[in-house]
Image (cartoon, rainbow, N blue to C red):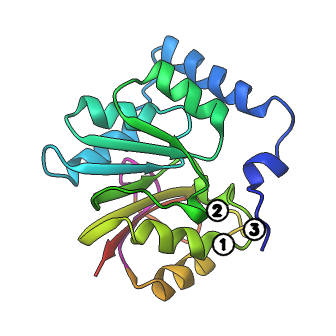
């Protein structure tokens, strides 16, 4: 297991700033960037506590905060956290590696991890991340993961093994954040997990 996330090792210099500018440009062009937030919001009671794990530039955390939830955003990249605080104020943001995450907070109702976070983790840390995130969710709460199919980095079969090993239950799987059906040919998965 490596302790350095692929977000840093498998991307080019300047990638973080490029990512920030990409989402600022999309927002300025009026692109709908809140599909994930609409789905997650539908799973929550008003005023729920949400952890955005791998929050990036804060677009999802900000959207959920505007919908009335109490949101904490965490990302390993300080450049992205700085952009999140500037572009989407309201949530509480923290720089932290998800594999060692330990927030001193009451349990969350839901953890969401969008934007391919699972394929940018440190190699071999995926199960540890699932355990850490599960430990931050109340009994009966949910975790929602969306990431691309990448059989060489983190295949869905291994994700499912890690889900089972950490005591989580797969409730639903979709091919998009708009609930399109998942098939063996789908190149993206949104997995809804429950803490038993």
Q: Nearer the viewer, residue 169 or 74?
A: 74
Please state if 71 lies on the left or on the right of 191 as rendered: left
Dot 1 surroundings within 10 Å: few (below 14), some, or many (20 or more)? few
- Residue 46 on image: x %, y %: 13, 44
Please tell me which residue is depicted at 34% across the width and 40% down the height of the picture: 37
Specify whether residue 156 is in view: no
The disc, 3 or 1, on the residue closer to the chain's N-terminal end is 3
Residue labelled with disc 1: 155
How far is disc 1 from disc 2 in space, using C-alphas? 6 Å
Please tell me which residue is depicted at 78% across the width and 69% down the height of the picture: 152
Q: Is residue 108 above or below residue 34?
A: below
Residue labelled with disc 3: 123
- Residue 138 on image: x %, y %: 26, 68
The disc, 2 or 3, on the residue closer to the chain's N-terminal end is 3
The disc, 1 or 2, on the residue closer to the chain's N-terminal end is 2
Q: Quadrant of the N terminus?
A: bottom right
Of badges 3 and 1, the one in the foreground is 3
Which secondary structure, mark 1?
A: loop
Residue labelled with disc 2: 149
Of badges 2 and 3, the one in the foreground is 3
Q: Is residue 97 above or below residue 192?
A: above
Quarter of the rendering containing residue 142:
bottom left
């Amino acid at each position: 297991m490596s302790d350095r996330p692929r977000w840093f090792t498998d991307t080019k210099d300047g990638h973080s700033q490029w990512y920030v500018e990409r989402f600022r440009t999309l927002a300025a062009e009026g692109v709908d960037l809140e599909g994930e937030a609409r789905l997650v919001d539908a799973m929550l009671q008003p005023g729920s506590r949400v952890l955005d794990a791998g929050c990036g530039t804060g677009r999802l955390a900000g959207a959920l905060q505007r919908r009335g939830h109490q949101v904490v955003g965490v990302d390993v990249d300080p450049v992205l956290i700085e952009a999140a605080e500037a572009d989407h104020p309201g949530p509480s943001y923290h720089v932290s590696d998800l594999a060692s995450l330990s927030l001193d907070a009451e349990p969350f109702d839901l953890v969401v991890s969008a934007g391919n976070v699972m394929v940018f983790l440190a190699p071999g840390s995926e199960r540890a991340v699932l355990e850490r995130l599960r430990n931050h969710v109340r009994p009966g709460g949910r975790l929602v993961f969306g990431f691309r199919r990448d059989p060489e980095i983190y295949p869905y079969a291994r994700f499912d093994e890690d889900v089972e090993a950490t005591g989580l239950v797969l409730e639903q799987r979709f091919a998009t954040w708009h609930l399109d059906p998942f098939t063996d040919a789908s190149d993206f998965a949104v997995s809804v997990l429950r803490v038993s």
